[in-house]
Image (cartoon, rainbow, N blue to C red):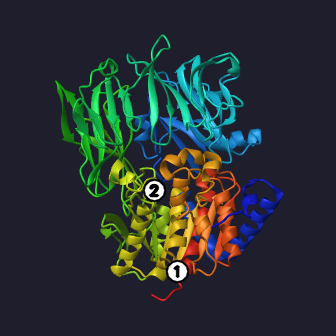
Amino acid sequence: MIEDDGWLWLEELDAADAAAWVRERNAETVAALASGDGFDRLTAELRQVLDADDRIPYVRWRGEHLYNFWRDSAHPRGLWRRTTLDQYRRHEPEWEVLLDVDALAAEEGENWVWQGATVLRPEYERGLISMSRGGSDAAVVREFDLKRRAFVAEGFTLPEAKSRVCWIDVDHIYVGTDFGPGSLTSSGYPRIARKWRRGTPLSDAETIYEGRTDDVSVYATHDATPGYERDFVGRRLDFFRSEDYFRNGAGELVRIAVPEDATWDVHREWLLIRPRSAWSVDGVTYPAGALLVTRFDAFLAGERELTVLFEPDARTSLSSYAWTRNHLILVLLADVRTRLEVLTPHGTGWRRAPLPGVPEFDYTGILDTEPDRSDAYLLSSAGFLQPDSLRLGEVGGAVETLKQEPSFFDPGGMTVRQFFAISADGTSVPYFVVGDPSSSGPTLLTGYGGFEIPLTPHYSGVTGRGWLARGGTYVVANIRGGGEYGPEWHRAALRERRPRAYEDFAAVATDLVRRGITEPERLGIEGGSNGGLLMGVMLTRYPSLFGAVVAQVPLFDMRRYHRLLAGASWMAEYGDPDRDDDWAYLREYSPYHQVRAGQPYPPVLLITSTRDDRVHPGHARKMAARLREHGHDVSYYENVEGGHGAAADNEQRAFISALTFEFLWRRLASVNA
């Protein structure tokens, strides 16, 4: 174990010695992997996918327009634009460009990266645009006039911070930001929410809610649904628990009395509640992962008449849902395959019916609805070998295909197969195998296993061209800790139970070999963020199972993660290293503390970003240094911008992907099958 961390100086982001170390490592990796015509061709092929003009321009409804943010080779930083539904139905719609981020960056001499926009309902004439320097989470906020297509002089403006903003009306917003010393939580997010009136200094804004320093964050929101305008405030106690209030017209706070670990949502007169753990109410126990509905006003008044809209079983969970004006659409996962249902209030109950127009074998999600105006919905469907399609429907009406993504690689001879591995404790763990079953190429296995986030079938032209088309096999493991089977699947790998996720991943790797799909020396693995932590554990605890490892924007130092950037917000997931009981189990898998001299490890590539202000690049830096110190084969690349995504534009994304595929292919394909 590490008692005195000799590599702590690498946590200093822009210190001269740390920056020099990064430049040296980058130069070594680029010289070894990114030189030659083959790498240039691969990068160009991946860039073609990312910049393709015939990609689907995914949209969001805002009033009468569909809004899109678009990047291509001519606009690497992107265009914020909009069009009408009639235009969008055309092969080449006419777009109204609202903001050219490339032109703005050139004009202002800033490395602006688009982070999104909050638009004022229901007029949709004003927006609050967030942009960051280099792709970090911290962003500048500026008010934008959508009619004039220009920023508002003397409008609402915030300097760079991890801010939260929400429109109340044209002259007022809710804001949480860095107001000065003591205004942020230990996770670096807002601790104070204020109501800010146009034309007044931010320092004079009215404080309406405060949290505690050890909270993750606070929030204040306004629901602008006509006839149901409401305000809410609350504090995130940790990543999964919150304390929430309805703020009435007099500014009084009324507790929304749901369990702290439940999620909830309001739509018109309805309140939806999804408990993460079993919840007993008036003698009835509702299971974790259920979806309940009641009338909002009655619930606040103390009534507890709850209707079950969904109840999970051992193989089926609720993935997501969306309201239209008069209906509720559920997206269900059954062994990681989707089923969609539409629910409609009817008398004293709810009618249930399958949603038509959903492909049988692809993953289908709800892209958007317009609940203020209609019962229309947009569905996005894709499979590992089936490019994305975008469908428009209306509950009770017809479904039409609006857009179809092109195929970026030839899937001829390829199949998608689903298998189940048996983990160390007997749990059945699903995984997908994609590729040509007759291919003798190497295999790439990926996973995540955290924060109740599921890995579902998806189409990736980048993976298709960079891996599958070259003869590789691609595998996605649906391990515990994710959301594939709801909250219980996640809870099974929470905190001290985290090793269950690692045992699951190892079981999938072992099962791939048992089935003859690959061999350990031809099996590479890749993951990012929490998935990067997974890669670090595989490297240090299960090195004999793999031939190469890639970890992107990873966590590695589980002794200090909570002291770096947003790390404190993840203690509900991993544990608190300052508590002896928690550190006792964290130290057993913390990759940085498990590196050993003399232990054979497969070659590893670590990728991060200097501007990642979520997972500190010090994790990857120190791990690379420690592996090098003990003579292990480690390559390191740190992008100078890009935030937690490790890339700020498509050129950088193509380079990072090409670097990953090149590293894996060289290490794995040269091994005799």
- Residue 433 visible in the shown view: yes
Query: In the image, is 121 to the left or to the right of 650?
Result: left
- The answer to whether residue 110 is left or right of residue 412 is right
Front residue of this view, candidates 243 and 642: 243
SS at circle 1: helix
Residue lying farthest to the bottom in this orientation:
672
Seen in the picture, residue 647 relative to 592 is either above or below; the reply is: above
Q: Earlier in the sequence, mark 2 or mark 1?
A: 2
> Where is residue 151 shown, x and y percent of the image?
66, 28
* Identity, as a three-letter code, of the amino acid under mark 2: Glu
| Residue 246 sits in quarter | top left
- Location of residue 328 by image quarter: top left
**Residue at 38 percent of width and 18 percent of height:** 228
Residue 90 image-quadrant placement? top left
Residue 249 drawn at (x, y percent): 46, 12
Q: Is residue 77 above or below residue 350?
A: below
- The spot of residue 35 in percent (x, y) is 68, 74
Q: Secondary structure at mark 2?
A: helix
Residue situated in front as seen by the camera: 33 or 285? 285
Q: CA distance from mark 2 to mark 1?
A: 34 Å
Question: Who is closer to the viewer here, 366 or 605?
Answer: 605
Q: Residue at x 17, y 25 (%)?
A: 348
Name the side, left or right, on which 358 lies relative to 481.
left
Disc marking residue 652? none
The residue where tag 2 is placed is 496
Q: Residue at x 59, y 50 (%)?
A: 578
Residue placed under numbered mark 1 in the picture: 668
**Looking at the picture, how far across and down is residue 42, in whole percent?**
58, 70
Q: Give the residue at the far top of this rendering.
A: 250
Q: Quadrant of the C terminus?
A: bottom left
